[in-house]
Structure formats: structure tokens, C-alpha cells
Image (cartoon, rainbow, N blue to C red):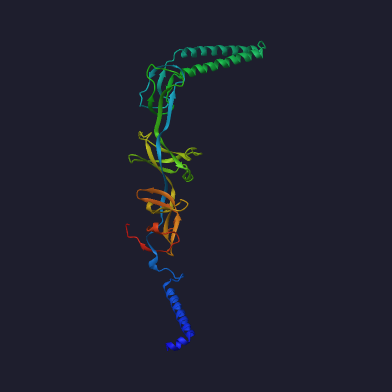
Amino acid sequence: MFAQLSKRPWIIAIVIAVLLVAWLLSGDRFVARDEVEPDQPATTADLARVEIQWLQAEPMQRQHVVQGQVEAWRRVELRAQVSGSVQNLDQDKGSRVAADQLLLSISPDDRPAQVARSEADVRQRQSDVTAAKRLRERSLVSANELMRLESELAKARAELDSARLQQRNTKIKAPFAGIYDQRMVELGDFVQPGQSLLTLVDIDRLKVSAQIAQQQVIQLELGQPVKVELLDGRTLEGELHFIAAAADPGSRSFRIEVKVDNPDGLRLAGASATLHIQTGEAMAHRLSPALLSLDESGRHGVKWVNEAQRVEFTPVQLISVDNQGAWVSGLPPKVALITLGQGFVQPGQQVRTQLAAEGS
């Protein structure tokens, strides 16, 4: 047989070609079976798994929490308006005084005599004017002469008012009821106009000042209730009574002041306090601050799973944060929040979900 095939070599070539084609075709079918069809969907086992917790929005009181400084409602530094020696310390430092009560006396020196001279001069000028008016009725005095005498009378009265004011200024009185807080002079000291003598503070009412960010000031209104928390844990109730019309150029924040009644006269001026400013009720979700993340724009948000089992990222507004958690707004009323695995999935990604264990 081989002798016959050797005489016909073309037959051998045909057989070899047929075998080669058959081998190539069998190889294509093998590769095709091993490759995954591009349109074949991923199986459930291939999806990332995350834990979720269903959260329902709840009503809560919106509030801003800022650090503030307690100040006396009024504080005034009384200064000398005349020169002289400190003649008497009429009240003790630290005592409570009434409005218009005498606090300190400066020596009168020759001021009473100046008042007496001015009073006599006014009486004389008044007499001259009265006589001139009678003579003017009979045309015995010119109008210009009468005008000159009236001008001298007005000048004498002004000098009398000045002398009396100088004498009154030797008596330093309380402009309002308060606490005689500090004294800068001692008995016998010589003082000059403008020199500080003492300070008076009113603590029957207090004000707590603070700076608030420009993003938050638009939510404030005068009269809003404010809780003032002191460092020792005590709380006082107050209300917002001042909001600055312009921001501080350096910090771009606005000064606010809270009015707080202090009927017990607690000595709190100068202390620090925390302000809790109520800004109305809102629907919000309470969650752990650890679940907050940032998007590419730097906005706070959270990841959750929609009905199609795909990850969503929603920016939220941080209403308040405390030791127990954070209140945020901006989410759907009921949301499947991702509590575990949020760092390994991206928005739009399909995932497998599993309910988080209670208390986790």
C-alpha cells in the first residue's frame, strides 16, 4: 500500500491538509468553551457584601452649639472730670450700690466760692437787664445797649452753670445700680481729669457673647431661646437679643449676644460657657459620625442602598454632633444605611446586603 502511495504523492498531501484543518477547528472550539461570554451577567456570589441598617427620620430640635464668654450686662469705668485730692471713699469696694449713690468724693477746693461769685454776677446782670428794659420803654436806652446787657447776662449764666458742674463733678455717683467692683485710687491721691477712679458692674442680668459662622447666622432670629451651659454643669435660660449686622473682618464670623437673667447675683462674669441655640424642629436621622464620608467636592455625605441593591451617596447637612452621635438631614425619610463595608463600594455599584446585628 505504501508502495502505491509513494507512486501518488499528491494523495499524501491531501490527507495531511485534511488532518491539519480538522486539528485547527477542534482548537477553536476548545478556546470558545473556556472564555466567558462578554454579555453574561455576574452571579450573586461575585457581588460585594455590605451590612445595612434601616433608619427612619425623626423630629428633632435643630440647634447650633458655640463657645461663648459670660459678661456683665453693663460695666463702666468712672473717671475724674476735675482735678483734686481724693477726699473721701464713700463706699467699700465690692459693695452693692443703688443708682445715684455717692461712691467717692474729690476735694472741692475753691469751687464753692466760684459758684457763689457766679451767682452774684448773674443777679447783678439780671438787675441791669430789668432796669434797661424799663428805660427802653421810655426810649431812654438804645436797643443795642439792651442787647449788650442781655448778652452779658447770658454769659454770666453760662459761667454759673460751668461752676456748678465743676462742683458736682467732685462727687462721683453711681450711674446705675450695681456692684462697686474695683477702685484704682486711695484716700489722699491727687487725680487729674481723665484718670480712672473705679469700676461699676451690673450683674442682675448677664450677656453671653460668641462668634457664629456666616453659614449659620442666617438661621438665627432675635428672641430665639438659648440654653447656656456653664463649665460646672449648671444651665441658665436666655434668649438671643443681638446679632451683628456685619461680620468681623478677620474671622468672617458674626458676634451674637444672649441675654440671661441673674436674679441670684451669681458671680459668673468672665467665665466661659457653651451656647445651645434652638433654631426650630426638623426631620433628621441620628447616626454614628464614623459613617460620614466626603465626596470629591469635600461635602459630607453617607452611603446607602436603594431598592435596586445599588449604592447611593447622598450629601447631608450636619445639624449637631454630641457624644451619642450625629443628627443629619438630607436623606430619604427611610433609608438602608450601609454600616459595614462602605469603604469598599462605590456609588452605582450593585451589592449584596445583610442586616446588621442589633446593637452593632
In the rendered image of this protein, does residue 195 appear above or below residue 42? above
Q: Quadrant of the C terminus?
A: bottom left
Q: Position of residue 224 (x, y in %)?
A: 44, 43
In the rendered image of this protein, does residue 244 appear above or below residue 175? below
Q: Quadrant of residue 57?
A: bottom left
In the rendered image of this protein, does residue 74 appear above or below residue 317? above
User: Residue 19 vs residue 137: left or right?
Assistant: left
- Asked if residue 133 can be seen in this view, the reply is no
How many marks on residues? 0
Q: Position of residue 146 (x, y in %)?
A: 63, 14
Residue farthest along the top direction in this orientation: 140
The foreground one among 216 and 290 is 290
Q: Position of residue 250 (x, y in %)?
A: 48, 37
- Asked if residue 328 can be seen in this view, the reply is yes
Q: Quadrant of the N terminus?
A: bottom left
Q: Position of residue 134 (x, y in %)?
A: 63, 13
